[in-house]
Amino acid sequence: MPENMIDYRSDNTGPAAPEILEALVRANEGTALGYGGDDWTRDLQRRFGELFETSVRVFPVATGTAANALSLAALSPPWGLVYCSELAHINVSEVNAAGFFGGGIKLVPVAGSHGRIRADAFAETLAAIMPGQSHRGQPAAVNLTQASDLGAVYRLDEVRAITELAKGRGLKVHMDGARFANAVARLGCSPADLTWRSGVDILSFGATKNGGALCDAIVVFTPELADSLAIQLRRAGQVWSKMRFASAQLLATIADGLWLRLAAASNATAARIAAGIAGIPGVRLLAPVDANLLFVETAAGTLDALERDGFLFYRRSRTVGRFVCRFDATQAEADALVAALRRHAAAVPRAAE
Amino acid sequence: MPENMIDYRSDNTGPAAPEILEALVRANEGTALGYGGDDWTRDLQRRFGELFETSVRVFPVATGTAANALSLAALSPPWGLVYCSELAHINVSEVNAAGFFGGGIKLVPVAGSHGRIRADAFAETLAAIMPGQSHRGQPAAVNLTQASDLGAVYRLDEVRAITELAKGRGLKVHMDGARFANAVARLGCSPADLTWRSGVDILSFGATKNGGALCDAIVVFTPELADSLAIQLRRAGQVWSKMRFASAQLLATIADGLWLRLAAASNATAARIAAGIAGIPGVRLLAPVDANLLFVETAAGTLDALERDGFLFYRRSRTVGRFVCRFDATQAEADALVAALRRHAAAVPRAAE
Amino acid sequence: MPENMIDYRSDNTGPAAPEILEALVRANEGTALGYGGDDWTRDLQRRFGELFETSVRVFPVATGTAANALSLAALSPPWGLVYCSELAHINVSEVNAAGFFGGGIKLVPVAGSHGRIRADAFAETLAAIMPGQSHRGQPAAVNLTQASDLGAVYRLDEVRAITELAKGRGLKVHMDGARFANAVARLGCSPADLTWRSGVDILSFGATKNGGALCDAIVVFTPELADSLAIQLRRAGQVWSKMRFASAQLLATIADGLWLRLAAASNATAARIAAGIAGIPGVRLLAPVDANLLFVETAAGTLDALERDGFLFYRRSRTVGRFVCRFDATQAEADALVAALRRHAAAVPRAAE
Amino acid sequence: MPENMIDYRSDNTGPAAPEILEALVRANEGTALGYGGDDWTRDLQRRFGELFETSVRVFPVATGTAANALSLAALSPPWGLVYCSELAHINVSEVNAAGFFGGGIKLVPVAGSHGRIRADAFAETLAAIMPGQSHRGQPAAVNLTQASDLGAVYRLDEVRAITELAKGRGLKVHMDGARFANAVARLGCSPADLTWRSGVDILSFGATKNGGALCDAIVVFTPELADSLAIQLRRAGQVWSKMRFASAQLLATIADGLWLRLAAASNATAARIAAGIAGIPGVRLLAPVDANLLFVETAAGTLDALERDGFLFYRRSRTVGRFVCRFDATQAEADALVAALRRHAAAVPRAAE
C-alpha cells in the first residue's frame, strides 16, 4: 500500500495487537496434548468464566462465519427458523453458512433499524406464527448482531425486550458479537449483563476485528448445548490439533482488559470522525455511530475526491461510503478524513448530483 | 508435563518450528486487504507453483479435517462414492466430515495393507460397479493417504497404478497429505511427481504435524475445481479475514526446504527406533516404518513398564502401542525408547501374555 | 363433512378425476420392471415429449414440494442463490425444502406483485450483484410460480422478460407449475411456448391440485440436467419401485386434454365468482383472478357469517379469505358463495370494522 | 413381457393386491382436508394402534428408502453413527439416503450372517468405542433389516439380544421392515412382540413389496420422536396433500389380515422352491430361506440355461442367482423353476465351472 494512503476499508485489514502475537509465540514451549487437551485451553475456560462471571464453555474457531453458523446449528434443528435482521451478517455476508451447517435452517428477516431488529416487529412476527404450521418450519432461535453491521448498538433494555419475547416462545438466543467488544465498550456494562443475564444462550465472541489474528470464539452459556457443539466443531474442521496457539491468542485478548482498550480506541476514532462530520453541509451519517463504523452519505463527487486523495474505503453506492476504524487508527488519520470531507463537500456542486 | 517424560503421543503435541512463528510475527506490518487479497497470499500461489512446478491454487485452511472434507466436496457430487482405505483418516477419525461437507458423500472402503489401498483390490471394486446402478451412488473419487495412518508410504508406481484406474473410470483423485512431507522426504521424489504428474487432482498439504502451528492447505492442480471450492471454503468458515497470518506460516514452511528438513528429521528418528527394535525378541513392528510412525506390538507388561517409565504414547490395544516421532524429537529420546523396550521386553515373561 | 358444507379450502381437498384412478387400476396387469423400467414410464416420456413438442425427461414424484426442491437442487450448486417472489410457495410453504435438498441453497426474494416477480425488479437485483462477491453466494437460478400463489398468471412476455435477464447472467430457470394447467388454460398458449421456448429449464408439473391423486412430475427440458437429477430422486426416496402406478396417473392426466379441461373448469368457477363479486360494495378482490384462486377482502363479520353458513375456506387474516375452486366445483356452489357474500356484506355494518 | 416368461426378478415387479387398489378408488369420495387431516389418516392411526397393541404414530411415505432414511434421521443427530449389517439395504442400495437425510449420519457395518448382524459382534463393536472419542462420531442407533436382504429372519431372541445391547448404551433401534410381513408370517409372533416389546423405536413398514402399490409407512413407537419427524417428512416432500389415497391403501393392507396372507403366500412359494432344490446335486442355497428370497448357487451354465428358458431373475455373479417370490406367484411357477434347475443341473458338466 502506498505511503500516503489511509485505510478505512475494514477492521480486518489491520494488524494484530502485539500482545496477542507475543502470547502466541510464548505458547511454543514443550509438548501439549492436541485438540484442546492443553493447559492454555483449560485456562481459557477459567478466564472466560471469570470475565463473564459464570461457568462457560469456550471454543476457539477460525472465523466469525464459523462461530455464527455453528452456534446457530447448535441452537436450532435442521428444520428451524432463525429470526434476524434483514441486514444481519449471517443473512447477507456468510454464503448461507447458517443454512449449510444447520442442515437447512432458514433465516427469516425481522424489521428494525440500522441492522438491529425491533422488539415490536419481532412480537408481530411471533404472533403471526400459527400453531401446527409445519409447512413453514419450526421457530427456533433469534439472532442479534451486537454491534450491528451498520455500527448501531442495542441497549441492554432493547436486548432484553427481544430475548424475553424469544424465551416466551421457547426460542433460543444467539448474539453475533463480531464487534462485541465495541458494544461492551460503548455501553459500559458488564459482559455478563449483555449476554447470559439478558437471556443470551450462545455468543460469537469476535477477536479478529479487534486486534486479533487467526481466531474468534464461541462462548456457550447454556451448558446443555455445549457437548453436541463440540462434536460439530470437530466435524467442521474447526478444532485445531495445536489448539494452544489459538487459546493463547484469546487469553491475551482478554488479559488486563486489552480487548476493551482496543475497542474503546476504535470507537473513539469513529466518534471523533462523527463529531467532525456533524457540522459539514451535504455530509450525512446514515446510522448511529455507536461503535467503530461510519456510513457516510454525500455527493458522489466528494467520495470520488476522497478516493483520489488516497483514502481507502468501500462504496456501498455512488453516494454512500463505509468507513471502519481500526484499533490502531490514529487521531491524525481521523482528522485527515474529516478535513478532506469538509474540503471536498464544499467544492463539489451539490446540484450536480 | 513432568520433566522426565518423553512424548511419543502425536506429531501434533509438538511445538511449531520457530521459523514459522517468526514469519507469522513479521507479517504483522501495516494494513492488508482481507480474505486473501493480501500480498502474502498472492506470494503463496507463486511459491507453491514453483515448488510443484506448475500453476496451482493454494487455499490455507485451519485443519486437516477441513482440507480433506472440502477437497472431497470439490471432487464429488453429493451423491458420490469416494473410495478409500478402511483405515483412512477420513473414514475413521474425522466425524464423517466428508459426508457432511459433501452433502451425503459416501466413503467406500477398498482392501489393501497398512492403511494403503491396493491397486488390484481397487480394480476389482471398480469392475463390480454395474452400469446404471444409481441406487448405489455415483463413483466419483479415490482418496490416497500419503503417508498412511499406519506410517506406510505409497511408492510412485503404486500411486500411479491406482490413479490410472481412477482416470480410466472418470474418477478424480485426492491425496490426503497430512504427512505429505514425510512421504516426499522418504521417497526422495519431487512434489510434482508425487502429485499432479501422477494424476492427483487435489492435495491436502499438511503443515501442522510437521512443525506448523495453525494451518494446513489445500493445493488444487486441476484448475476447474478451484473456483467453486473457493466459495465452499468461505461458506465453511475457513477463509480467515486476516489471511496473511496463515499464508505467512505456509510460506515459511516451504521456504529453503524447511518442510523437508523437518520431515527428514522425524523420519530419521523413527527409522533409528525401528532399527534399534529390530533385534529385540518379543517386540514386533506391525507396519513398515516409512515415515514417522511406529506401531509396536509387544507384551502388555512391556508397554505398561514403558508407561511407568514416563514414556507417553497411545495404546491401540493392550499389546500394541503407537509411537509418533516429532521433528524435534532427539536421538537421545529415540535411544531411550529403544533401550527401555529392550530392557522391559527381556524382563517381562512372554508366556505370561 | 356435513352435507351442507361447500368446500373452498384448497384444490387438494378435492377428489381425483375418475379417469386418473381408472388408469391407475388398469396398470395393475402382469409384472413390470421396477423403478421406472416399465412400459408406462417409457410411454410417459414419449407422451410428454409430444405434449411439449420436444424431447423431455419426465420424473414422477410424490409431491409438489419434492418436485420444486429437487428441481432447484438440480439447477443450483449448494452455495447457490435462487431468486423468487417473497410469496413463492418454495419460500413460505415448503419448510425450506429447497435449502435442504439443495445442500444450503438460499432463496432471495425479488419484488413484484401478487406472487409474481417483476422483470425490472429482477434486473435491479442482478445489477446489484458485485463480481467476486463470494461471501453472498453464487447467483444460480430464478423461480417463477405459474400460476402464482395469489392466483395471478405471468403473461408470455412477462415470463420471457425474466428468463432473458436470467440467461444473460448464466442463471437457470425453474417454473413451479403446481397450477401450470390453470396458467396454460388461462393463456391459451401451448405448453411449449410457456416453458422451454420461453427459456424454462425445468418445470414442476402439478397434477395433484388439478384432479390428480398421488403424484406430480418434474419435466426437464435441458437434457444435461437430467442424469444427476435421476440419482438425486432415487436418494430422495422419490422413485417408486412400482412406478407404473404413478406413470399411469400422469398419462391419464394429459390424455385427450383432460388436464386442460379440468383446469378450465376450475378457472371458470373462479371467474364466475369474481364476476359475481365485482359489483358488491365492501367486497374486494386482492389479486387478479387469472386461475382458480380468489383472495377476498371484506368485513370480518362477513367472513364470520360465511363460516356460519357452512362455507369452508382459509382466513389469511380477520378480513381476508382465500377461496380455491376445485375442478369439480359446481356453478351452483359458485353462485351460492356470491349470493352469500352479497347478503352478508349488505347486512354487516361496515363501520363496525 | 412375453407370455412364457416367469418373473423372479423382484417382489416389486408384481401387481398390487386388488383389495388395495379398490380401497384407493373407494376413497375418492367428497372433499377431505389435505396433508393427513382426513378421516382415512385418522383411522390409520387407530388401526395400526390396534395391530401393534399400543399407541403409535403412522406416517405414509412414498418409498422404503424414504421410510428408512427419515426414520434414521429421527433417531440420530447429524453427527451420529448408525450400526447395520454390511449388506443392509440402507448401506448398499439407497444412494446413502440415510447420510443425506441425516445430515451426515455415518453407517458403520457390524459383522453377522446373511444380512443380519450378530449380537456378539455388535457387543464387540460397542465395547471398542472409547469414551470421548468425538473424532469418530456419536454412537446413535442400530438398524435391523427384518427380513434381511438375503432372506434371513432374526428370531425374537436375536432381536432382543441386539436391542438390549443398544439400550444399554443409549442407542435407538430402527427396524427396516421392507419385508416385515414376511418376517411376522414366518415367526408367527405378534407385530408387537417383534417391535416395541423387543425394543424397536421406529419401524419402516413395507407394503409395496407385499402387494402394495404406491406407499410404505413409518411406524413410530417412541412418541417423543414423532413430532420432529412430521416436520422432516413435510420438508422431504413425503406428505401427500391428498393423503387419503395413501392411507386408504395402508388400511386395506392390514384389514382382515391381508398383509399376512400375502406374505404367507410368497413365503410358501419360496419354501416350496427351497424344498424342491434341496436334493439337487450342484445346486446350493446360500442363505436360509426364511422369507420370500432364494439365493441359488450353481454352475453358470445352469443359470444361463434358466435364462434361455425364459426365467427372469438377477445374477449376483456368474454362479449366483437371486430369485424373489411375489405374493401372486403360483405353485406351478415354483415347480417349473425347480424342474428346470434339476434338468439343467444334471445336464451341465460341473467340472466345466
Image: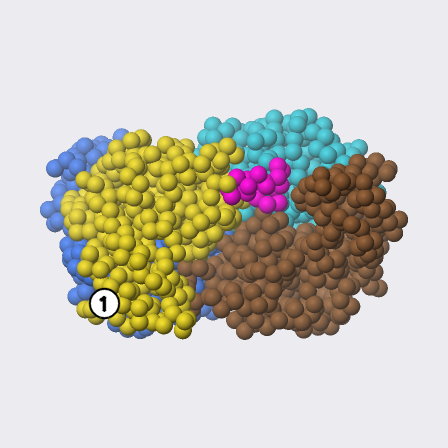
Chain colours: A brown, B cyan, C yellow, D blue
Residue D257 percent coordinates (x, y): 18, 64
Q: Nearer the viewer, residue D186 or B24?
A: B24
Judging by the rendered image, the residue that carries numbered circle 1 is C5
Q: Tell me the quadrant of the picture where the N terminus of chain D can be found.
A: top left
Q: What residue is shown at x 68% (from left), y 33% (from top)?
A: B184
Horizontal side, residue B256 vs residue B108: left or right: right
- Which three-letter amino acid code belongs to the residue tagged 1? Met
Asked if residue A15 shows in the view, the reply is: yes
Write down the chain letter for disc 1: C
Callout 1: helix, strand or loop? loop
The magenta-colored residue range is C121-139
Residue A33 percent coordinates (x, y): 71, 57
Asked if residue D123 shows in the view, the reply is: no
Q: Tell me the quadrant of the picture where the C terminus of chain D can be found.
A: top left
Q: How many labels does the image show?
A: 1
Residue C213 percent coordinates (x, y): 25, 53
